[in-house]
Image: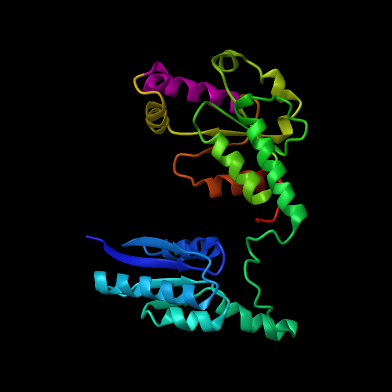
Amino acid sequence: MSERKTVFFVSDSTGITAETIGNSILAQFEGVQFDGHRIAFVDNKEKAEAAALRIKMAYAQNGERPIVVNTVVDSRLCEIIAESGALMIDVLAPFIGTLELELGTRRSGAINRAHGMVDFAQYEARINATNYALAHDDGIDPNYREADVVLVGVSRVGKTPTCLYMALHYGIKAANYPLTEEDLERDALPARLKACRDRLYGLTIDANRLAQVREARRPGSSYAKLEQCKRELALADQLFRREHLPSLNTTSTSIEEIASKILAHLGIERHMF
């Protein structure tokens, strides 16, 4: 039986950084199951005390020392949180002192710098990219002139969530094209895609997983039958090979990894927001 530990991701901002880094670290311990809880916007004494009380209550209830992954900037608030008795992992502390020495300046102590609207141009680029992904979802608007990437694949292989992830986190204008029965039976690339073939990337998935996803969406339909899924995937794979399109199997791959591999293959360099 695997061990279970309670983890709190505590931040004076959104908690995204604490949770992202924390989960990356915790994922290295496969024999332990972690129950994660985010406590965001701990930016004053009262909120820090409330966070400490919540953590302390979890300690008393479970009898197991909780883990706190902390990105709170104010050291005074960190001390209050530490009074909970939890194991404190300060994500920022190992880097701040070293950088202060290297840069010859003290940190500002400002909160909400990582995920706030610090650069309005970058924020607007993300919003525009997200709107673009929504407008070009599932071939709704087949004008791909402005697209940085166009994902191609049969229905339910993960095109839409990947497009939205790339838009939100990288400001990528990502569109997706669902391969129809007519497309799959042709011996040529769909006409709409020929003009942007250098920006095409294929997504596929294992047939059993695709059948599960489709069954959840349309129970009992021919669309969700395993044989139908196998047929569509085989034809899509033939298309990718024939047209020399790069492709990726998404079955056991996270959206983050899918996006990173696509951008790396296409040579698109963008900083993550």
- Predominant secondary structure in magenta? helix
Q: How is the image coloured?
A: rainbow
**Residue nearer the viewer, 258 or 135:** 135
Q: Is residue 40 above or below residue 106?
A: above
Above-or-below relation of 180 to 260 = above
The answer to if 181 sits in the magenta stretch is no
Give me the residue at 60% from left, 49% from top. 260
* Quadrant the N terminus occupies: bottom left
- Residue 251: image quadrant is top left
The answer to which of 178 and 244 lies nearer the viewer is: 178
Q: Is residue 228 magenta?
A: yes
Location of the C terminus (image quadrant): bottom right
Residue drawn at x 63%, y 60% as measured from the top left: 115
Residue segment shown in magenta: 221-241
Image coords of residue 136 (percent x, y): 66, 30
- Is residue 268 visible in the rendered structure shown here? no
Q: Residue, x 36% and y 81% (percent of image)?
A: 85
Horizontal and vertical percent for residue 82? 43, 81
User: Image quadrant of residue 17?
Assistant: bottom right
Q: Position of residue 149 (x, y in %)?
A: 69, 37
Please state if 160 lies on the left or on the right of 199 as rendered.
left
Residue 111 appearing in the image: yes
Image check: 1 left or right of 159? left
Kindly identify the residue that appears in the image at 62 percent across and 79 percent down. 96
Q: Of 120 and 230, which appears nearest the observer?
A: 120
